[in-house]
Image (cartoon, grey):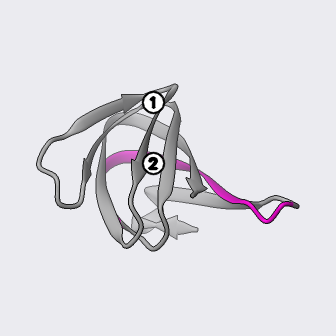
Amino acid sequence: NVYFDGRVVSHTVLFPSGEKKTLGLIYAGEYHFGTGAPERMEIVAGECTVVLDGASERAVYGAGTQFDVPGDSGFTIAVSAGICEYICSFL
């Protein structure tokens, strides 16, 4: 999947158990994503700032951290410099 003119790219991985994850890269910028199902975003490299829909506070996540996003919701993610790499698990 390619979003925002190539500034966000993800690859879907399907496991034999039926589990689905996406692996991706987010280049510098600010982007909003909607969710259908609940998601867990694990940051594996770089750093990002996240605001969940309906919230006002920003949280910073770096490599080795994660955040959950409720289903039928969304979040705004910003990368100030470089590339942020993530693994998204559908809960």
Q: Could you give the CA–CA distance between mark 1 and mark 2, rounded to whole angstroms?
A: 9 Å
Amino acid type, residue under disc 1 in the picture: Gly
Amino acid type, residue under disc 2 in the picture: Ile
Image spot of residue 15 (x, y percent): 82, 58
The quarter holding residue 53 reads bottom left
Front position in the image: 34 or 55:
55
In the picture of the structure, the residue carrying the numbered disc 1 is: 46
In reply to whether residue 86 is colored magenta, the answer given is no
Q: Secondary structure at mark 2?
A: strand
Quadrant of the image containing the C terminus: bottom right
Image spot of residue 74 (x, y percent): 32, 64
In reply to whether residue 18 is colored magenta, the answer given is yes
Residue at point 84%, 60% (across, down): 17
Give left or right: position of 29 versus 24. Answer: left
Front position in the image: 41 or 25:
41
Q: Name, please, the residue furthest toward the left.
A: 56
Q: Looking at the magenta stretch, what is its main secondary structure?
A: strand
Residue at point 52%, 25% (across, down): 64
Nearest to N terminus: mark 1 or mark 2: 2
In the picture of the structure, the residue carrying the numbered disc 2 is: 26
Part of the protein shown in magenta: 17-33
User: Compared to 89, does 62 lie above or below?
Assistant: above
Q: Residues within 10 Å of mark 1 (few under 14, many from 20)?
A: many
Q: Secondary structure at mark 1?
A: loop
The quarter holding residue 5 reads bottom left
Contact, mark 1 vs mark 2 (Cβ under 8 Å): yes
**Residue 32 visible in the picture:** no
